[in-house]
Image (cartoon, grey):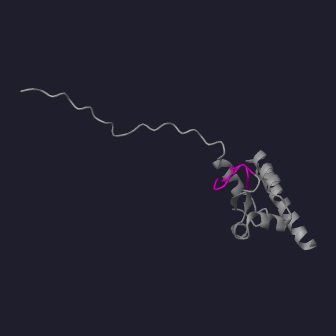
Amino acid sequence: MRRSRPIARIPREVPQPKRTPDPKRSASHLAFVRTLPCCVCAARAPSEAAHIRAGNDGGLGTKPSDRFTVSMCRRCHADQHQRGELAFWSGHGVDPTGLAEHLWTHSGDLSAGTRAALRMAMTITSRRTAG
């Protein structure tokens, strides 16, 4: 009787390459932004981390990096999506990019982030009452 050679077995688990972290994503920064009050109406935290798409590193169908996020309550964030980002921010007379950059450079500093978000909310409120 002739012995056949053993058949090579295919491993059951295919080794996955290690994923490199995406430099555009920061879960800790998003968690920080969610602890801040709404930068539009000053509603208390928790907030949603709203990405600023216009004029940043996002593209068509691509979410911008987490560097460009601001804190917004659910109501203001829904209003922003309904009206459109450019119409929303220009209607309030502010550019949120400066706030997003400030929050990125002070990520984790709750008091600095809260002051910056409330400062923008006061600016919006004062323009609303003046206009």
Left/right of residue 121 with respect to residue 59 in the rendered view: right
Q: Where residue 128 appears, x then y in whole percent?
A: 88, 71
Image quadrant in which the C terminus is located: bottom right
Image quadrant in which the N terminus is located: top left
Q: Residue at x 86, y 68 (%)?
A: 125
**Which residues, given as a range, are shown in magenta?**
56-69
Residue 98 magenta-drawn? Answer: no
Q: Visible in this render: residue 80?
A: yes
Main secondary structure found in the magenta portion: loop
Q: Where residue 15 appears, x then y in whole percent?
A: 42, 36
Q: Visible in this render: residue 40?
A: no
Left/right of residue 34 with respect to residue 130 in the rendered view: left
Name the quadrant containing residue 120.
bottom right
Q: Where residue 6 appears, x then y in whole percent?
A: 20, 29
Task: Point out the residue furthest to the front here.
Answer: 60
Q: Residue at x 60, y 40 (%)?
A: 21
Q: Residue at x 39, y 38 (%)?
A: 14
Does residue 18 sit above or below 89 in this rendering?
above
Q: Residue at x 66, y 48 (%)?
A: 28
